Image: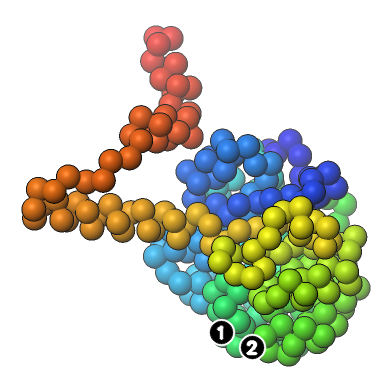
Amino acid sequence: MPKTSIRQLIATEKPLVTPLAHDALSARLIERAGFKGLAVGGSALLAARYALPDIGLAAFGEMLAGIRDIIAATDLPLVVDGDDGYGDVKSVAHMMETFLQLGVSGVVLEDQLLVAKQPGDSGATAVVPTNTMVDKIKVAVATCANTEMQLIARCDAYKLEGLSAAMRRAERYLAAGAHGLFIPGLSSVEELAEVGKAFKGVHLMTAQFEGRPTWLTPSQYFEMGYRQLTLPGLLIPRLVNCMDETLQELNHFMETGQPLTTYPIASAQKALEQALKFEKWKSFSKSQ
């Protein structure tokens, strides 16, 4: 079980930076790099484990299988993607109870309509009525009452209804008991600042992507009021790019004999062995 919780880290980090793990190995590498917590993104997990897009194709059990692997691999506290709770309020309660038993430290519950779900922050095409989301939040919060678990309400209404309407929804979500908020897709620093000012003091999360106008330093986000920063597009696109380029080079080598681009094999192997805790397992053989 993690020694600390996301709730505790939010109170001390400025802000808490949680890279997204998509499998057990990436979780180990995040821990090895010195980060204090991590997040599990649905899009990245589905891509890595099932080669599927995050458009509502996976059931709770399929997502849970990947999350279990990650939890078993690290002692870091983690926030997981709870999608829409995988159904009605009964499903939300079941999901929260399951995550509590596993030791999950935070859950993001979203108001996207599952049958119209879009990946990442690419823009929801439909959201549930505010009252429906409020009912789910109340059940989720009641299920994790008197625990360290954080329930973060994700409001995907920004691109559909505008920022003001999304913020009104967010206020309702907080009033229903949500411990934190996440309004994805904000397209300017000014909008980030407006949300940060309105909800300063709340466990406010933001997800950012390289190359966008909103790509700022963690300290800048913290000054605006954000307490947790996640980076959904950081690891898996780089991983895909590296594997794709390597395989293309290998194919070219097979055809022409032209050598592959060199890379620091020794340091990469060392990082892999440390992430796999190779010496720990090797020590069992030495003791026999």
Query: Residue at point 55% right, 52% down?
Result: 21
Q: Is residue 138 visible?
A: no
Residue at 57 percent of width and 43 percent of height: 30
Residue 124 lies, in percent from the top left, at 62, 83
Amino acid beneath label 2:
Ala
Q: Earlier in the sequence, mark 2 or mark 1?
A: 1
Q: Disc 1 residue type?
A: Val
Residue 206 drawn at (x, y percent) = 71, 64
Residue 190 spot, x, y in % from top left: 77, 75
Foreground tag (2 vs 1) = 2
Q: Quadrant of residue 89?
A: bottom right
Residues 37 and 24: in front is 37
Which residue is drawn at the image coordinates 17% and 45% (left, top)? 259
How many C-alpha atoms fall within 10 Å of the one at disc 2: few (<14), some, or many (≥20)? some
Please tell me whether mark 2 sits on a helix, a strand or a loop: loop
Q: Residue tagged by mark 2?
A: 126
- Which residue is disc 1 drawn over? 115
